[in-house]
Structures are given as C-alpha cells and as structure tokens.
C-alpha cells in the first residue's frame, strides 16, 4: 500500500492518514524505535541483577539475548515507512513486523526463564514475575497500533508462566505452599494486566472516536466560517453592484411595494429613493400607453412565485415616454412563500426606437425589392418580346436567298441582337443573385450530357475562329448526379464563351475529373484551359469582380459587360463549390471549378436537353397537327406563322387568355404555344382551366418573355409540358414541339 502524504491544511484527511492501518503501523514503528534506549535501561538493570545474583555468565547472556531481540525488531521497524512509500504491500510489512515482535518476545522470555531458574534468583520468583508483567504491559499497549505484534507478544508472555510453573510443578510437586501462592499471585497479576490493557485499549478507542468527532466538528465549523465569510463578501459585492449598476435595481416586499432602489433608478425615472420607497412601481411609473394586460401577467407570475420578464411602456417623472425591460424574480423563503422580489429594469427606449426604425426600413427595403423585381420582370418581358421578333425575323431572313452584302447585314443584326440578349440575361441574373431571389433547382442528371451540351453549342463558334475545342473525361465517380444542371451548364457556357472569345490561335480544352467521394457522391474538378491572351498577375484577384476586365482595352476589343465570371462565381459558391484561376500573360488562362455533388438515386432522363431532329423527322411528327398559339403581340404571331410555314400543320391563333381557353375546349388542338402575359387571363390561369375542363388534353409549351427560374417552375406547376423563353430560335422551337409530341406518342427521343 502506498503511503502518500496527507493533503496540506485538511485536519480530517490528516487524522485519517495518521489513524488508518498504515498510519498506525508507522506510528507503532516510530514509537518502538524511539523508546529503544529507555527499554534497555530495564534490560541492563535486570542483567546486572542476574550478574550479581547468579554470576557474570548468567547476566551477560541475559543482556545479550534481550538486546538481540530488540535490535532485530527495531532494525526492521526503522525501515517500515520507507518500505510503504516504495509501494511494498501493507499486509506483508505487518506479517514481518509481527514475526520480529514475536522474536523479541521470545528473547525476553528466555531472560525471564534464566531469572526463574537461576541458582539464587529461583528462590524468589517475584523478580521474574515482575519482569514478565512489565514486558506484558509494554507489549500489550501497542495493540491499538499493531494488533498482530501486540497479540503475539501477549500470547508468548501468557504461555510463559504456564511453562515456568509447569516445569516447577514437575520438579517440586504441589507440596510447596510458596509455589501455589506464587501461581495464584501470578494469575491475579495477569488478570490485573488484562484489565489494565483492556482499559487502555478502550481508552484509546474512545480517544480516537472523540478526536475524530472534534476534527469533523472543527472542519464543519471552519467550512461554516468560510461560507459565512464568502456570503458576507458576496453580499458586499452584490450591494456594490446593485448600487452602482447602470440598470435600475428595485427590492420589493411580498405585496409589491418598493423597499429600496439604486441610483440608476433615479437617473432613469427621475424619482428619488425617498419618493419611490413605499409605493407600487405601477402607481409610480404607469402611463396611459402602458399595456395593462402585460402588467396583469407580471402580477400573476409573481403571485405564483415564478420569474417574469417583459417589456412595458412607462412614463418618467417629467412625463417622457420610457420603455423598460423588466426582469422580476421572487425570493422564496424556507416555507415556500415569497419573501421579497428583486427587479432589474433596463431602459430600452432607444432600442425600441431603433427597432421601429428598422421595421420601417425593412418595409421600405421590401417594397423597393418588390418594385425592383416587378421592374425587372417587366423589363425582361418588354425587351424580350421585340427581341423575339428581331432575332426570329433575322433567322428567317438568313434562310432566304440573300446577296453576300445582305447576308453580312443579316448576320450583323443576329449577332448584335444575341449580344444584347446576353447583356440582358447577365444583368437580370446578377440582380436576382444580389437580391437572393435566384434559387437552385437540384435534380438528377447525367454529368456527361450536361458537359457535352455547352461544348456542342459553342463548337461552331470555336470552329469559326479556327480553334480546337477538346473535351476530356477521367475518373471513377458516378455518372448520374443530383444538382442544378441548368446552372452548371450556364457556368460552363460562360467559361467556354470567355475562353473562345479571348483566344486567337490554338484551342480550348475542357477537362472533367470525376472522383468518388469518401462519404458518397462525386468530387468534381472542371478545368477550362485556353491558349489565349492570358490575364496579368495583378488582375487575377479582381477578375471575378462585377464589370471587371483585364484592362480597359479588353472591353473595346472583345466587348462584353464583365459580368459572366461574377455570375459564375456566385452560382458556384451557392452550390458550395469554389472557382480559381491561374494564367500566364500571352500563354492563356485556366479556370478551375471544384464541386461536391451527391449521387442520383436512379438514372435520370434529361428533359432540359433539346433533342436533334432531321428535317424529315420534323415534318413527319408535325404533319397534320392542329397547333393553337396564344399570343397577344402581332409581331410574335407573324413570327410563329413564318416559323411553321412549309409544314403541313393547322395553325390557329388566340389573342388573349380567355380566347385561348375557349378555342382549346372547342377545337381540341394537339399542341398549344402559350404566352404567360396576356389580357383577360394569364397563360398560367388559362393552362389551369384547360387542364381542369378539357376532355382532350393538348401538349402545352410555354413560349414567354418571362425568363426567370420561378417563371419556368410556375409554368410546369400549372400543368405545362415544356418551357421556352423568348427570343426563341426557329430550330429550338421546332425541336421542342417535335420532342413533346413524340413523348405523347411514346416514341424514343434524342
């Protein structure tokens, strides 16, 4: 058992340390070793008596034997504490020290026997009996400290007189009166020794119990004194805090009357302590604007003995409006009754005013955002509608027989209109991102199809500049993912369009690394690298800022608003990804997009991708179809008529939403092209009525200038089958019509 040092300053721990088995053993050992010299006085005295009475040999032998036993015992005892500290088991130390005690008792017994049977000392056994009594008392008083050592000594000293008298009886018989009287006296002395030791051991135990109680009571008293001192100190601190706090502090009696207020109460309300004490806070501070229902809830909570917090409007002494945040806590006595109430009140008048200002500002901001959203929607619709006519008619004009100059003029109109449309789209996208109105629409999609589509769309542009456009796939990640693939396509179109625009020679490479993620899904890294003009190092950190270009001449030479990269970065960050760029001026640039996308639950069918149809397939699918176009703009009706000229279709027009519903119910068309914004009924309202009332359900495709994601979602939710935003290309319109009609007929598409 390890005998660790007791905790400093802990009387009870020190008492336990001194009086456990190990502590008592150490005390026993220290006492035996310390009294070694005093015990030898009796040893030498007895040896000298034997020397004088029985001869030098007898005295010397007795002294040597007695000192040997003491030396062996004390030699082991003086090292007990060190042995325990080294971790020697307590039981082992107790056993060995019991053996050394027994050895010491045997050596004393030999000395007593030498006196009992000495040539002259045998004539009077009183000396031997007295020596034995002294040794027994000395051995017995250690019983509380080392029960084993005391017991073995008393056992040896108890057996010794039996042996001595037994030998004397065998030698002299019972004839000797002195022998009988000596034996009786020895027994009587033994009983007295027993009584004395019993009293001594019991006294030690009483002393131990009383001392423990005193130590425990002393510890409790010290703890109480410490707690009292701490409470007094805490009370002093709390008094200082309450007195000097910035918030008002009130003490109320159980009836709610003010007992004490601090200086902050006077500064806040204007009432002095003398004016407030004895009055009810409500009678002092409530005004016409005070909410009495709140006051009633406060009184009810305090009556139930539960804390209550609220804000209430009061009046100061001078009549000024005062908003108070009050926190009132009842103090409960030992009987469960409210003893007093502590109220802490904070002046929140400025915060309330700020809150009202913020509400007004928020309403103004919301109204501004609503007006902005309405303006953007109107602007988008009003610009896209004529743009639809410009681009559509330019496409039709390009397909007619033109001279070389006329074709140049037509291509210029088309490219200029497309550039204008790109600017409009960028501005609208940026506005929606800034207003947090653009939401992602994640769905299952095919990664390769998603990446191939932008490459296919921009390949003619790259080919026109004599550039190579390469697409590289690698990795073991899942092919079907879950995310907003339309926004991913938009990002790739922006990056690819920039790369092609700023590259004069060489080419553009798109690398897609699709790695299986440890926690499922795919870690995508998409690189778009070109061999173009590159970006100066000091411009790299600004390249994603809105309206930013590498330098002013870039805009003049290549055009553009500088919003494409800004929109791409914002979309990527909305998806939880990152975009970085590295570049060497004159050698090209590389944009790297990193995304994590979850895996799709099942292989999706990509409805957003427009399938390719040959002219023969288009004619076959559209042949004989009754097509109803709901469009209020004359230029768009003319454009649709031109787009579908040459096809064997029955084309009908409706000029508003109500007419579209009526004709749909009466004429049972196969397909409808539905504008969203029309007189009488909107396209969404008209679609809902057709879906609810028509016994023959046509294919309905939205053809609208409303180009927001929310517009697409609203059209599809209303029951439309497809969505096209204006301006629309003739090829896209014909392909979507054929695709939707093929789905209805159950034909494979794509």
Image (cartoon, helix red, strand yellow):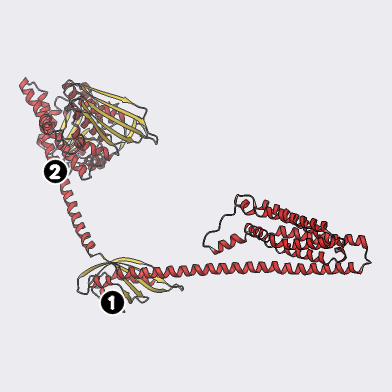
Q: Secondary structure at mark 2?
A: helix
Find residue 182 and report its horizontal and vertical position in percent: 86, 68
Q: Residues within 10 Å of mark 1 (few under 14, many from 20)?
A: some
Instruction: State the residue in front, 598 or 602.
Output: 598
Find residue 718 and report its horizontal and vertical position in percent: 25, 41
* Image position of 351 (left or right of 333): left
Q: Decide if residue 536 is in sight here.
A: yes
Find residue 221 and report its horizontal and vertical position in percent: 51, 70
Which residue is denoted by mark 2 in the rendering? 378
Instruction: State the residue in front, 381 or 281.
Output: 281
Instruction: State the residue in front, 55 or 530.
Output: 55
Q: What is the quadrant of residue 502 in the picture?
A: top left
Q: How many marks?
A: 2
Q: Decide if residue 661 is in sight here.
A: no
- Which circle's residue, 2 or 1, is located before the other in the chain? 1
Instruction: State the residue in front, 180 or 198.
Output: 180
Which residue is denoted by mark 1 in the rendering? 273
Q: Residue at x 33, y 35 (%)?
A: 597
């Amino acid at each position: 058992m390890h005998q660790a040092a007791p905790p400093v300053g802990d009387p009870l721990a020190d008492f336990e340390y001194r009086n456990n088995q190990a502590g008592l053993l150490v005390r026993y050992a220290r006492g035996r070793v310390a009294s070694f010299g005093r015990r030898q006085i009796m040893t030498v005295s007895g040896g000298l008596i034997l020397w004088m009475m029985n001869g030098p040999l007898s005295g010397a032998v007795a002294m040597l034997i007695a000192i040997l036993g003491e030396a062996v015992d004390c030699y082991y005892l003086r090292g007990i504490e060190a042995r325990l500290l080294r971790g020697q088991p307590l039981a082992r130390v107790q056993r060995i020290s019991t053996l050394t005690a027994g050895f010491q008792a045997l050596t004393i017994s030999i000395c007593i026997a030498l006196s009992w049977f000495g040539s002259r000392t045998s004539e009077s056994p009183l000396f031997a009996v007295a020596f034995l009594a002294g040794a027994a008392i000395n051995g017995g008083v250690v019983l509380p400290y080392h029960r084993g050592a005391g017991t073995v000594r008393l056992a040896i000293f108890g057996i010794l007189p039996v042996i001595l008298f037994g030998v004397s009886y065998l030698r002299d018989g019972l004839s000797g009166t002195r022998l009988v009287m000596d034996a009786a006296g020895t027994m009587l002395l033994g009983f007295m020794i027993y009584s004395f030791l019993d009293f001594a051991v019991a006294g030690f135990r009483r002393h131990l119990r009383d001392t423990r109680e005193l130590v425990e009571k002393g510890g409790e008293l010290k703890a109480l004194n410490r707690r009292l001192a701490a409470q007094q100190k805490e009370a002093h601190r709390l008094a200082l805090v309450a007195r000097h706090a910035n918030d008002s502090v009130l003490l109320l009696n159980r009836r709610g009357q003010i007992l004490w207020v601090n200086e902050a109460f006077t500064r806040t309300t204007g009432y002095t302590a003398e004016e407030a004490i004895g009055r009810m806070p409500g009678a002092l501070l409530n005004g016409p604007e005070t909410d009495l229902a709140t006051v009633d809830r406060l009184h009810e909570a305090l009556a139930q003995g539960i804390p209550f917090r609220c804000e209430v409007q009061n009046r100061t002494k001078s009549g000024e409006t005062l908003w108070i945040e009050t926190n009132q806590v009842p103090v409960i006595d030992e009987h469960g009754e409210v003893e007093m109430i502590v109220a802490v009140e904070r002046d929140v008048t400025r915060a309330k005013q700020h809150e009202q200002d913020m509400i007004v500002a928020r309403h103004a901001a919301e109204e501004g955002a609503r007006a902005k959203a309405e303006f953007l929607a109107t602007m988008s619709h009003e610009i896209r509608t004529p743009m639809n006519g410009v681009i559509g008619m330019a496409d039709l004009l390009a397909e007619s027989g033109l001279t070389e100059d006329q074709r140049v003029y037509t291509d210029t109109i088309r490219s200029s209109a497309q550039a204008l449309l790109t600017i409009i789209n960028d501005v609208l996208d940026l506005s929606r991102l800034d207003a947090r109105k653009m939401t992602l629409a994640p769905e299952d999609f095919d990664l390769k199809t998603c990446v191939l589509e932008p490459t296919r769309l921009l390949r003619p542009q790259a080919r026109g500049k004599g550039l190579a456009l390469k697409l590289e796939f690698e990795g073991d990640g899942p092919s079907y993912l879950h995310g907003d693939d339309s926004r991913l396509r938009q990002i790739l179109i922006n990056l690819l369009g920039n790369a092609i625009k700023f590259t004069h020679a060489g080419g553009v490479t798109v690398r897609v690394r699709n790695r299986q993620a440890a926690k499922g899904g795919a870690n995508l890294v998409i690189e778009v690298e070109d061999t173009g003009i590159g970006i100066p190092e000091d411009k790299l950190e600004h390249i994603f800022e809105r309206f930013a270009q590498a330098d002013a001449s870039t805009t003049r030479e290549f055009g553009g608003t500088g919003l494409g990269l800004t929109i791409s970065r914002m979309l990527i960050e909305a998806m939880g990804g990152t975009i970085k760029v590295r570049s060497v001026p004159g050698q090209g640039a590389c944009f790297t997009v990193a995304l994590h996308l979850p895996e799709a639950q099942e292989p999706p069918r990509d409805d957003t991708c427009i399938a390719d149809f040959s002219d023969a397939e288009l004619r076959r699918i559209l042949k004989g179809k009754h097509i109803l176009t709901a469009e209020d703009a004359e230029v768009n009706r003319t454009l649709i008529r031109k787009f579908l000229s040459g096809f064997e279709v029955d084309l009908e027009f409706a000029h508003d939403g109500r007419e579209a519903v009526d004709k749909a119910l009466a004429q049972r068309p196969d397909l409808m092209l539905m504008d969203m914004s029309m007189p009488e009924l909107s396209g969404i309202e008209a679609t809902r009525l057709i879906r609810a009332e028509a016994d023959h359900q046509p294919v309905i495709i939205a053809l609208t200038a409303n180009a927001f994601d929310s517009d697409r979602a609203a059209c599809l939710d209303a029951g439309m089958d497809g969505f096209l935003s204006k301006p629309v290309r003739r090829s896209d319109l014909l392909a979507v019509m054929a695709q939707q009609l093929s789905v209805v007929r159950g034909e494979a598409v794509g």
